[in-house]
Amino acid sequence: MCEEVVGVSAISFANRGIERRVTTPFNAPSDTCIACGACAYVCPTGAISIEDIKGRQVLHQELYLGPTTAIRVPFMQAIPNVPFIDKDACIHFKTENCKLCEKACEPQAINHEMTDEYEEIDVGAAILTTGFELFDCSRIPRYGYGRFDNVLTSLEFEHLCHASGPTGGKVLLQDGNKPESLAILHCVGSRDKNYKSYCSRVCCMYAMKFAHLVHEKTDAHIYEFYIDLRAFGKGYEEFYNRMQGEGVNFIRGRGAEVTDVALTPEEEGKLIIRCEDTLIGMVRRIPVDMVVLCPAMVARKDAEAVGKLFGVTLSQDGFFREQHPKLGPVSTDADGVFIAGACQSPKDIPDTVAQGAGAAGAVLSLGDYVTIEPIKSVIDEALCAGCKICISVCPYDAISYNQDKKISQIEEVLCKGCGACVAACSSGAANQQSFKDVQIYAEIEGALV
Amino acid sequence: MCEEVVGVSAISFANRGIERRVTTPFNAPSDTCIACGACAYVCPTGAISIEDIKGRQVLHQELYLGPTTAIRVPFMQAIPNVPFIDKDACIHFKTENCKLCEKACEPQAINHEMTDEYEEIDVGAAILTTGFELFDCSRIPRYGYGRFDNVLTSLEFEHLCHASGPTGGKVLLQDGNKPESLAILHCVGSRDKNYKSYCSRVCCMYAMKFAHLVHEKTDAHIYEFYIDLRAFGKGYEEFYNRMQGEGVNFIRGRGAEVTDVALTPEEEGKLIIRCEDTLIGMVRRIPVDMVVLCPAMVARKDAEAVGKLFGVTLSQDGFFREQHPKLGPVSTDADGVFIAGACQSPKDIPDTVAQGAGAAGAVLSLGDYVTIEPIKSVIDEALCAGCKICISVCPYDAISYNQDKKISQIEEVLCKGCGACVAACSSGAANQQSFKDVQIYAEIEGALV
């Protein structure tokens, strides 16, 4: 197998007689072996085993530690729901052999010669729906994420509850036992001046959904640690009432710490949540088996680069800035560029769907004309020194350099009249129409006299 | 004036010499007088006065107690922002005279002969945006609305703060003084099993806006009584932080009562809010000068009738039911009928604008075809007794009565397969395709065996 299919000669026979074994040369870890596992997979006697290098049981995190196969669907419920070949894991891309999958695929859908292609498409409008990232919980060390096996993020817990997840939908601890108690910590990294000061909007509701799932699947005691229970949408408050009826313990107070240092015999072997229960005004220690953290939804790392590409600026929280917080929640300052979903700010599915439909509607109702800003910048050709500073500060790519005249020029259709170039122009060549310095001074004088 | 213009002879001269006065016959309240006030308005000496029948100073409520003129814009910021003639108040519609406004209007825009017209318009789709009503705060007598002058609803307070409002935007008590302290009570009728169990979603934020306005306009101490502070949207939490910085007192606890019964000298002449401050676990009494109630947003009284007209059902909370709470927030079960805004559930301006754009987008992307439900009802002509019960229960007007055959018939394009007719049919003639009784029994048997 190793030689014929994979194209590597990493295993062979060693010893003689009844001692004869299949193993790597000299029974030592092999440099040639690519740890593909094919030999262990085809061996009918189970004589070959692949040693787990870390030696750690990876019950929950296996979805994250690496691919189980080189051909896979990128993630559950991916759209389009088709598999791709992970070039880093595929034997063929390491040894140029194998291609077993090609032989197995009846409709001959596998082609190892395909390469990624970049296509240029002319469009009249674009909707940015780049979504969000999750706050990295290990940035708050006191919650023990990454240190304690049974501290999970909400997305990991969602995988765990999923019928096609690593435990087939059962809520299990790393040791395979059912938890007797479980804590859900809201606002991890959200509503926290040290990390993200905004509210992530969706956590309260999915945290209660988790409580409901755990209640359904186990007999565990469930604790929700919250600051404000933000059940604001249609039917949400009703669900909150239902969860209180199901016996979920709602503790008003941000979890302060997750620790395994037991102070009493009951706390032995447990994770202890330390928190201030603000409704009784006491610091409490609550021992649980499993902790689910609800991390903040944060803007994607590439938001600034993508924004720059499309002429969309960012809000203070790092998400894309809408044209108007109340009246233009799907438009941006860039004509023809719209935003929808969590790339604008954290939001749940109903609000995302509504906003997405809104962005689509905005595109569909675009006329075959462009609305031009009445107040825009003008550059006095006689004064412009051609230093190009204005070009670098313009967020709308509205200024270009005229090589012949050696000056900067404004494309009136693109200019939004933000005034960045006016402030940056050191020679006073850039001015805003109707807002020239002399006009503003006159206004101030008029107001003061 | 009374005779020439208004066309009524309600006033005349009485007495003689220096006792001679203009008054009603025998100086008694006149049956002919229509209390138009024209005589008092034109009298240059102020000798004629209209007595306020109630004799109560109406500083705040004047906007609600009645029109100040018979021609007016229906409410501030109305769209379209044009005046209309209130036929109940207009002198012309009482006496067939007057028409002074016609003479005064230079562009001759006034026409007393115009009548309301009903127009029939053929449309391919409809978006219901009928909005909401406010919960009637007088239904909760312990808050004293309607009993204490200085207990206002949020909408009344909004009017009060408005630059074109009765006080020119000043925050004043009924006696014209500035309040030294002010309480804002969240969740009046919301999150309350006795009234509306849902959350009205917008109150937390506008209550904080009020606090900000009061802070800006007065030196009053401000108290916000809340259960959970639901600052969930983009920039909302930041605003909450800012309000805490402005010194607003946030008290976690629903206001229990507003009373004027003073127990201490400091409470004399004040309105006292009694509440449980859940964060210190104590019942408190906080004396204030003014109380603003944040009433629940409730479904319009005509929601059921309008829904019936368009084939849109209502959710348990009385608002229009969307097709799917997550995936279809702007569609309804009725093809071509969409909903947006607070008629679907309470929501704030950004979410309403996004949903409105979404509904518009859904209309714009309608194809020239109709999607038919795969599971629909069928009526067995041989079994149908023609009792018409199915017609009365069908929420989609999909069943009609065939006079010739004396049976009910289903319009397949309209039927949504809800099964209401199947449950109601006493002769067993109505059945759901693929869900006939015998099929369901077989399924149950299969599941149980």
Image (spheres, coloured by chain):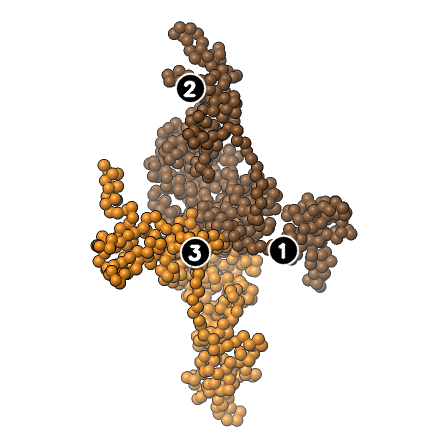
Chain colours: A brown, B orange
For residue A444, above or below residue A384? below
Pointer 2 residue: A40
Front residue of A265 and B352: B352
Q: Earlier in the sequence, mark 2 or mark 1?
A: 2
- Secondary element at image label 2: helix
**Amino acid at pointer 3:** Ile
Name the outermost residue toward the bottom: B17
Residue B145, given in percent of the width and then of the height, sits at: 42, 63
- For the C terminus of chain B, give its image quadrant: top left
**Left or right of A396, for residue B63:** left
Residue B223 can be seen, yes or no: no
For residue A196, above or below residue A47? below
**Amino acid at pointer 1:** Ile
Residue B294, given in percent of the width and then of the height, sits at: 45, 58
Q: Residue at x 53, y 51 (%)?
A: A363
Front residue of A23 and B297: A23
- Secondary element at image label 3: strand
The chain under label 3 reads B
Q: Residue at x 47, y 62 (%)?
A: B155
Report the disc number at residue A372.
1
**Can you tell which quarter of the image residue B30 is in?**
bottom left
